[in-house]
Amino acid sequence: MVPDAATSLVGRVVLVTGATSGVGESTAHALGAAGATVILTGRNIDRGRDVAAAIGSGAEMHRVDLADLSSIRAFVDSIGERQIDVLVNNAGVMAVPLRRTVDGFEMQMGTNHLGHFALTGLLLPRITGRVVTVSSAAHLVGRMDLADLNWERRPYNRAAAYAQSKLANLMFSLELERRLAEARSPVCAVAAHPGYAATEVGSHTGTWFDRLFGFGKTILQRTPDEGAESVVVAASDPGITGGFVGPRFLLYGAPGRAGIARRARDRESAARLWELSEELTGVRFTLGRQV
């Protein structure tokens, strides 16, 4: 699966988080096949090296734990001033029991949103092309509680926490798109969602997601490669410079413009989420013209 638009990546450097399995692995393979040099990141270094070897000499693996801000900073320091053309914020956890990251964040918000927020901010001065952030159709049922982002006071609900983190992903991407445009930066921000894809991440959550994924496996039978199509298009199509890309029929179909929940379009809430994310991560963005 390599859409024609992916030819725009020949000779470019693409970083994909969570590239050791599922949609992230399929995305890395497709972008590598399109001629990109692919930097894979994830926690399982051995698995990542196997994936990189399968992609070919233009791929390399680095260990990054998005649930640990010190791991993110160490990775960014380790690659020095290396230029990144496209960053794909793909990694994520789904509907896990209540756990905390190394820095005390609720695991899904900490990994899915705050970890990617920090990584993007630290890498942005060396990003030349675009930032792709993977959200989900689950954002449609998400509710953002900025007074209790990390579930420290409310009773924890892991499906609701996942939906909130995916809403945060989309709100972050749309806010980044606005701020980059205001700063007249040549970098663009695009959000994407894979729809249904038969991966392990959503099969054993102990929530209603299990029923949805069971339905998907029985009826839709979409592979991780098919799920990655929207992400690859968002990362490679020069005609798409913002917004939200997803399957035509929400969970399946060819990639196109995806519907965005009204809550994700709330600019005031997005600005407050941005400020809170800066406060929690200690990362401030450089949004002027990038080198």
Image (cartoon, grey):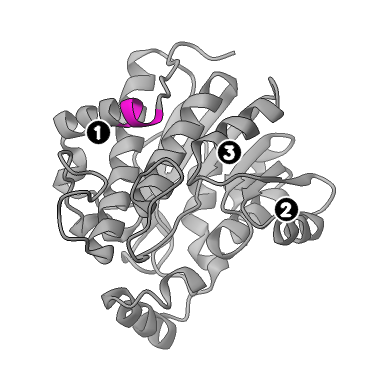
Residue that appears at 34% across and 66% down: 97
Reading the image, the residue beneath label 1 is: 273
> Gap in Å between the C-alphas at discs 3 and 2?
29 Å
For the residues bearing labels 3 and 2, Cβ distance under 8 angstroms: no
Residue 204, located in which quarter of the rendered image?
Answer: bottom left
Of labels 1 and 2, earlier in sequence is 2
Give the crowd class for mark 1: few <14, some 14-19, many >=20 residues within 10 Å: many
Reading the image, the residue beneath label 2 is: 33
For the residues bearing labels 1 and 2, Cβ distance under 8 angstroms: no
Residue that appears at 76% across and 45% down: 60
Q: Is 262 displayed left or right of 76 in the figure?
A: left
Reading the image, the residue beneath label 3 is: 71
Q: Is 82 displayed left or right of 109 in the figure?
A: right
Q: Amino acid at mark 3?
A: Ser
Which is in the foreground here, disc 3 or disc 1?
Answer: 3
Measured along the vertical axis of the image, is residue 66 above or below residue 251?
A: above
Q: Amino acid at mark 2?
A: Ala
Residue 190: image location, x then y, percent: 41, 39
Q: Is residue 287 magenta?
A: no
Residue that appears at 31% across and 58% down: 162
**In which quadrant will I find the C terminus?**
top right
Residue 159: image location, x then y, percent: 26, 65
Of labels 3 and 2, earlier in sequence is 2
- The boundaries of the magenta stretch are 277-281
Of helix, strand and loop, which mostly describes the magenta segment? helix
Q: Secondary structure beneath disc 1? A: helix
Q: In the displayed image of the protein, which residue is found farthest to the bottom?
A: 218
